[in-house]
Amino acid sequence: MSLAQHLPALQVVIPLLAAPMTVLLRQRTLAFAVALLASWAAFAIAIALWLQVDASGTISYAIGSWPAPWGIEYRVDRLSSFMLVLVSGIAALVLPYCRRSIEDEVPQRQHYLFYTMFVLCLTGLLGISITGDAFNIFVFLEVSSLSTYVLIALGRDRRALVASYQYLIMGTIGATFIVIGIGLLYLMTGTLNLVDMGQRLAAVQGTRPVLAALAFLTVGISLKLALFPLHQWLPNAYTYAPSAVSAFLAATATKVAVYVLLRFYFSVFGQSQVFDQLPMQQAMLLLALAGMFAASATAIFQSDLKRLFAYSSVGQIGYIILGLSFDSTTGLTATILHLFNHGITKGAIFMLLGLVALVMGGTSLSRIQGLGKRMPLTSLGMVICGLSLIGVPGTAGFISKWYLLLAALEQGQWWLVFLILLSSLLAVAYVWRFVEAAYFREPREDLDAKATVPWSMALPAALLVAATVYFGLSTAFTVGSASQAATFLMGVR
Amino acid sequence: MNTTMTLGGHFTYFITIFLMIAGLFIVIARGNLIKKLIGLGIFQTSVYLLYIAPGKLVGGTAPILSDAFSVYSSPLPHVLILTAIVVGVATLALGLALVVRIREAYDSIEEDEILNMDAVPSRQEQA
């Protein structure tokens, strides 16, 4: 009983404590074991919290027994419990995958530090999702960001260093914008507790500092979530990072940033304020559409698969933001659904690409010619995930696009339905680039397979591919959670 | 009279905004990786001021309860900014460490030179 009460704290504390332990152990197998246990424990706790929230509603946990709004509150509601399950679930799958994957990509004496950074990144992402304190969000954001920069810099290619540096500059500007926004809100309300802040903002609604805070937060968070014109850091970072890192980041990091945006827009500002006083709806709609088309079109012309799918991520983030811009429950459901569905799909894709990189020595399209013959199962997995990116019925991507279309139809915006379908055609084009190279070209004779597919990497990847199909067929968990979270967010206003 | 009071009252905001813009400008305009980090440092420092200055009340003392005083300054911004300073130092340290590694790998810390160096081999790779 007493332990169950402290689950919200343990959710963050367990991976946090695992980080120094991996450093002290200094031995890669032990460090791996500790990190694995921590991530599995975090996943178990996340599921327990989800069940608890599902049964009895929002959980509020006062850190150090200092009651909110003075103390820091951990608040698990419908949305955050859903995020916790996604983040810790992906971590629990990526960690066993890491062990073999980083053997080729990271120098052996740095392996234990890799696990340190990985669990720290997990800590930060879980912390952002669970905390109910605005400044705490910033601190956890930086915990996850700083460890992400290190993880990216561990990539084999020297360009990983430049990618990491660029991400550090952009990410820090983004984070500083977020602190400025939080600071202005704090000046106007005198509180940092998100719920309390939301209630007190009503009194100072529409004043200039509050509008400035809204603008700063929007730009800062958009940098973190790689909204279209602010996405420059993402393609390089995903391309040159170690495969396991790409898989983890693609599935979680930008998604958690979207969560922060939802949290501020709906729980703090209350969407009436966001959408009435500034033309946020139009701005978000425009940027989302620009991202959907420009980034997806750029993806078609890439010669490296990792970079191709990184650009595809920017395009898919467009769909997520598009759902948000509808300012309706159905639209929000689509946003939260796509957050989850795109997370597992992209995670699976980057895990499979890690396998390809291991066996073929790279992921450029010229290298993977004839992959359908050499690695039939991996190629099949890629095709399934590709179909999910396009939004073919039977895959997870279809469900979220379906809700997106419903939201557009609900508002009678037929032209948007047309544009969503048109942009899906771009996804067909870039997925076809892979299919063409893998199935319609002969394998290159000069390239030999460098390794056999290790089961420790294949199994987690296969599980995620299976999840992509499963959540396309059985939507009870995803649609249920997403629509409840959306109703909850819309109800706060 | 009124304008001078506003100017005086808003003095810290002018400094804050000046540092903010100056820092951001350096990050954008400079190609030298270390200068960029210095700009980033200035940018972050401006935020410390944004938080701390409004916490101070004229005539206020440290918040230790006493009968002699009735006006106290808010200590919370200091605590927040201590955290933010730690984050800023960590970011700067990590950034500088990355610059060292970049220098080892490229033998340069000028952004345009580094990007040029990579532009050529990547084209060969594709061929």
Image: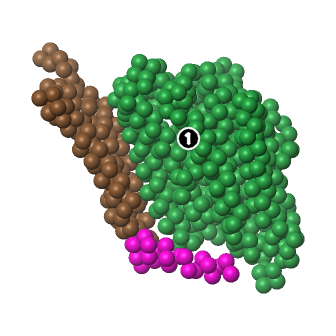
Chain colours: A green, B brown
What is the quadrant of residue B94 in the picture? Answer: bottom left
Q: Which residue is depicted at the point 40% across and 46% down?
A: A176
Question: Looking at the image, is A410 positioned above or below residue A357?
Answer: above
Circle 1 SS class? helix
In the displayed structure image, the side of residue A23 where residue A295 appears, left or right: right
Toward the viewer: A79 or B93?
A79
In this view, the residue farthest toward the bottom is: A446
Tell me where residue A416 appears, x and y as whole percent: 72, 40
Tell me where residue A94 appears, x and y as whole percent: 67, 53
Q: What is the chain identity of the residue bearing mark 1?
A: A
Question: Looking at the image, is A46 positioned above or below residue B99?
Answer: above
Q: Which residue is depicted at the point 67% across and 37% down?
A: A323
Q: Which residue is depicted at the point 36% across and 68% down?
A: B32
According to the picture, the residue beneath numbered tag 1 turns out to be A283
Q: Is residue B41 visible?
A: no
In this view, the residue farthest toward the top is: B67
Q: Does B120 appear in magenta?
A: yes
Toward the viewer: A457 or B40?
B40
What is the quadrant of residue A448 in the picture? Answer: bottom right
Query: Which segment is the magenta one?
Result: B103-127
Tell me where residue A360 appears, x and y as whole percent: 74, 73
In the displayed structure image, the side of residue A440 where residue A124 appears, left or right: left
Tell me where residue A456 appears, x and y as whole percent: 74, 59
Q: Main secondary structure of the magenta part?
A: helix
